[in-house]
Image (tube, rainbow, N blue to C red):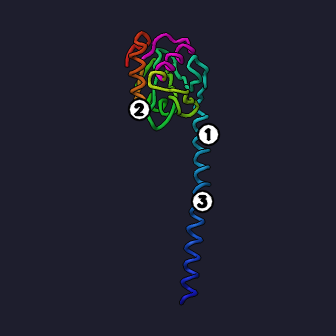
Amino acid sequence: MENSTIYLAVILVSIILIGISAIPFRYIRDIQAARRRIDGLGSQVIETKCGPVEYARIGEGDPLLVVHGALGGFDQGLFLARSIDVPNSQIISVSRFGFLRSPVPPGATLDTQADAYAALLDALEIRRAAVFAVSAGSTSAIRFAARHPERVTAL
């Protein structure tokens, strides 16, 4: 009876170890798939006077700056913009500081994030844009409108 208990314990521990060792492989596979998906969305990193900023630009027409929430970067912004009806719009979806390929500059604040939006528009030679923001992106979008009201056609 004692040998069968040891045998069962060895089998259970082996199954658990195999399961645990599979987790990193699945994680790496899932991260690689997510990176391929994001790479296929056509974002760019542009150097601005506030540092590098990642963005994606789709469509033609009136500029609409899209600011994502806490669960993604420019990719979430593109998803959100596609889920609303914005005909005749040029979507400019930005990755906020610390998301995807937009680094966090030293001393980053909501004001410096807002200024980075203005710098992105400058680099893209866009004078004014409507702004669509959700969730965690809303605070920096509001700061952008407060700091640069002449740049915002709607919020």
Q: Position of residue 118 (x, y in %)?
A: 49, 16
Q: Is residue 17 above or below residue 63?
A: below
Q: Residue at x 55, y 11 (%)?
A: 125
- Asked whether residue 127 is drawn in magenta, I would say yes
Please state if 114 lies on the left or on the right of 8 as rendered.
Answer: left
- Label number found at residue 36: 1
Which of the two residues, 127 or 83, is positioned nearer the viewer here?
127
Q: Badge 2 local density, few (<14 within 10 Å), some, or many (20+)?
A: some
CA separation in Å, label 3 and label 2: 34 Å
CA separation in Å, label 3 and label 1: 21 Å
SS label for mark 1: helix
Circle 3/circle 1 CB separation < 8 Å? no
- Label number found at residue 22: 3
Q: On the image, which quarter does residue 102 sit in?
A: top right
SS label for mark 3: helix
Q: Amino acid at mark 3?
A: Ala
SS label for mark 2: loop
Q: Residue at x 58, y 28 (%)?
A: 43
Please state if 106 lies on the left or on the right of 139 as rendered.
Answer: right
Q: Badge 1 local density, few (<14 within 10 Å), some, or many (20+)?
A: few
The answer to which of marks 2 and 1 sits earlier in the sequence is 1
Magenta stretch, overall SS: helix
The answer to which of marks 3 and 1 sits earlier in the sequence is 3
Q: Position of residue 151 (x, y in %)?
A: 44, 12
Which of the two residues, 44 or 60, is positioned nearer the viewer here?
44
Bounds of the magenta span?
Answer: 113-130
- Asked whether residue 78 is drawn in magenta, I would say no
Q: Amino acid at mark 1?
A: Arg
Q: Position of residue 146 (x, y in %)?
A: 38, 16
- Pointer 2 residue: 136
Q: Residue at x 58, y 51 (%)?
A: 27
